[in-house]
Image (cartoon, rainbow, N blue to C red):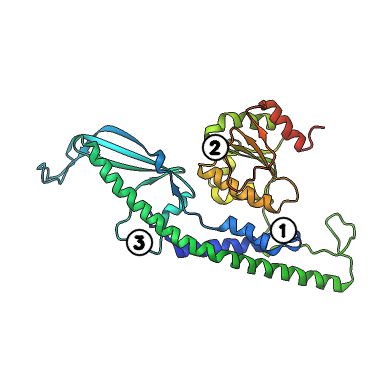
Amino acid sequence: MFHDYDFHALQEHQRGRMAEAIDQADADMLRRGDTDAIADVFVRQFRIDVPELIEGAISLTVDEAEVDVTGDPLRGFLGPGPHYVPGIRATYYVPYRGDRELFKCRPSTRTTVVPAAEVTSDELSFTFERADQDVAATKNAFDQELSRVNQYLGWLREDAATFNQSLPSTARQRVAARKSRLAQMEQGVRSLGVPVRPASGKTSAPSVHVVAARPGPAEPAQRYDVALSFAGEDRAYVEEVAKELRDSGVNVFYDAFEKANLWGKNLIDHLAEVYHKRSRYVVMFISEHYVKKAWPTHERTHAQARALVAKEEYILPARFDDTEVPGMTTTVGYVDLRKTALASLVELVLVKLGRRG
């Protein structure tokens, strides 16, 4: 943990990605939008949020184990091993919210003692073996290791706070510069006095079609009618919705339908594309689990960034319960799944898409 790359490299990477995103953003949106509002969209997308441990949900497993005591002078096993004795293996599980990748980042402040844990998509696991049955001793070892993790996360938060404070001014400058370039281009086109041909082939008022300067042909972006955002605990219900939508001819993004497509992709970047750019609507299945999980939070963040500048409704909330969603006001209309049958929800989506009258 906390050793694969340093924070300086991370913040430069985020600045570069934000600059690229601004330079490739929709030109019409840039021209029409307020500079501060547009900049805020990119700040929310590229700010660095350090994971938060959910210590109130720590759990434990304890199993019998054969423990290698080779080299332990107290047991007399100093020769070639391995030499096993009966013991225990205790594993402590600590859920977290946030980006898994940040557990690989070295903060600018650190010690020579680096914490060790296995990191999965939503929890840390700490494993301790003892050549006896003293479970309490494993708890002491776990508390020390957890304290080190919290110390490193604290240092990362200090780094992230400094970076996040600098991001708005950087984003505003980049957005303002792009808007200025677009204005200059449009003024230059207008000065020619030649009608500009839109994609339809008909002449119209002058406009500017901006093409990002990239080598080679651009890969066409697949557009989904609907992307489904949900927590794993609610998968059984959502899968039925996904199947009904697919059977009704809807191009739906549901991860289980995309296994081959997702294989080998950088999921952080790909899902950001799907939920920010490639979907007409996002159906957000809200539950107590939804706001706690890392991947739904990633999807929600990018969907909300798109919704901020969308001309029409983009996020379609469907509630399993009354859990508050960060960044979503209570005035947003939603479907109450406690009172709405699954078939009715599917029908509502079809109406929204214009597939039903």
Residue 346: x, y in percent?
A: 70, 30
User: What crowding class fits label 3: few (fewer than 14 Cα within 10 Å), some (14-19), or many (20 or more)?
Assistant: few
The label on residue 26 is: 1
* N-terminal-most mark, 3 or 2: 3
Q: Amino acid at mark 2?
A: Ala
> What residue is pinned by disc 2?
231
According to the picture, the residue beneath numbered tag 3 turns out to be 110
For marks 1 and 3, the one nearer the N-term is 1
Does dot 3 land on a helix, a strand or a loop? loop
Q: Nearer the viewer, residue 118 or 174?
A: 174
Q: Quadrant of residue 245?
A: top right
Q: Position of residue 38 (x, y in %)?
A: 67, 60
Give the CA separation, mark 2 to mark 1: 31 Å
Which quarter of the figure has residue 223?
top right
Given this view, does label 1 or label 3 mark the residue nearer the observer? Answer: 3
Crowd class of label 1 (few under 14; some 14 to 19; many from 20; radius 10 Å):
few
Pick whichever, 200 or 89, lies toward us.
Answer: 89
Q: CA distance from mark 3 to mark 2?
A: 34 Å
Name which residue lies at 12% across and 42% down. Answer: 77
Residue 208 horizontal/vertical position (percent):
79, 64
Per the image, label 2 sits on a secondary structure element best described as loop
